[in-house]
Amino acid sequence: MLGSAEELHAASDSLCRPGNANSCLRISNANTRSYAPRSTICGSIFDAPRLREQLAEVEKKASDPNFWSNQEQSQQVMRERKRIEAALASESDLARRTQDIEAYFELAREGESVDQELRGEIDSLREVVEKLETKTLLAGENDARNAIMTIHPGAGGTESQDWAEMLMRMYLRWAEREGFETVLNDYQAAEEAGIKSATFTINGEYAFGLLTGEIGVHRLVRISPFDQAKRRHTSFASVFVSPEIDESIEIDIKEPDLKIDTYRSGGAGGQHVNTTDSAVRITHIPTGIVVSCQNERSQHKNRERAMKILRSKLYEYELEKKRAETKKLEDSKLDIDFGSQIRSYVLAPYRLVKDVRSKVEVGDPDRVLDGDLTPFIRGYLLMRREAGNS
């Protein structure tokens, strides 16, 4: 038991290695026979007293009788309250987990066999700490905002259209895992299988910051389900992500610059198919940006949502003009074809998902396609931080 306990000490202490920005726990002992647990909650992530002060200030604002007279401002305050409460809950959870591990070390000191339980607690704590570290990497101006994601198939016909729908499902599953809400804005089904395009909003704290690294071309290699000869095919699809911009940021959109078309909504059938021309497509003539929405039954609501998407895309467009030297959206707007991918998903002849930029690899593609994107999101954000420090 003592040998494996030594292993566990090394594992737990690895959470606090120098340079690890998420260092929130330190457990140490002199040797395997003398358990002397020591833990500290790191102030680099949580300043609980300051957070409680901020929460008190927010609560004071929320108790004002005129608080709800300004809907936009009140919603911002409520989002801030939710953020602070989540940070305090994380701090409490981290303290509890640390105490549990200390208790297991105490039991081990008394001769109890707790290696399996201790290993499970440390592995669980590592996941929590890594998730917290990921949040420390999100400091961009718009990282905390909701995300608007658009997916288009590329070279490959039906293969790529099916692949685009697989990607859409992957991101919807990821959002579900994260506890985020998703709203489908526009869905254009392909004739045989898959989609021609899809746009959806992911509502959740730091949704845009977490998904920034998904912008670009995604490549799939598999035995085609549409090929009777069962040959291997390569398919491509592109992903674009922009932050959802609220009314607090002014975007000047002139009515003469807009071309607005209405059309009949399409879809897989059933209740989502409208019998009136309620779908709306808006073209911003100066930039050529086109957005559409058909999810709502009302033309007015579809237009309102489409305008919101347009404002977000125009905001990102203007940011890109100001930071042309950086590689973000424009670099991802390559031909959706060979040599331009940011990530490869190989299902045959071997099974591997590899990110070209961060070099992160996962040998279980099914897990990734079911929405487990944590290794790739974290890898990209760490790579971005290192690039910024170099």
Image: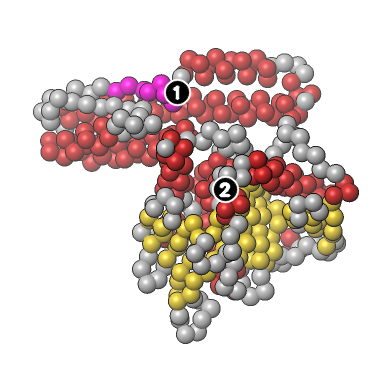
Q: Amino acid at mark 1?
A: Phe
Residue at 69%, 43% (x, y): give it: 318
Looking at the image, which residue sits at the far left?
Answer: 33
Looking at the image, which residue sits at the far bottom?
Answer: 229
Principal secondary structure, stretch drawn in magenta: loop
Looking at the image, which residue sits at the far front?
Answer: 325
Looking at the image, which residue sits at the far right?
Answer: 256
Measure how far apart labels 1 and 2 are at the Cα level.
Answer: 31 Å
Which quarter shows the N terminus?
A: top left
Residue 58 x/y as whole percent: 63, 19
The part of the chain drawn in magenta is 39-46
Let me know if residue 144 appears in the view: no
Residue 35 x/y as whole percent: 16, 25
Let me know if residue 161 appears in the view: yes
Q: Which residue is mark 2?
A: 328
Image-based side of 288 in relation to 201, left or right: right
Q: Is residue 18 above or below residue 290?
A: above
Residue 388 x/y as whole percent: 46, 37
Residue at 45%, 76% (x, y): give it: 232
Residue at 53%, 78% (x, y): give it: 226
Residue at 45%, 61% (x, y): give it: 344
Residue 386 x/y as whole percent: 42, 39
Secondary structure beneath dot 1 equals: loop
Query: How many labels were placed on the picture?
Result: 2
Location of residue 239 (image quadrant)? bottom right
Q: Amino acid at mark 2?
A: Lys
Residue density around tag 2, few if under 14, some if 14–19, many if 20 or more, within 10 Å: some
Q: Is residue 81 above or below residue 370?
A: above
Q: Which residue is mark 1?
A: 46
Q: Name the mark nearer the viewer: 1 or 2.
A: 2
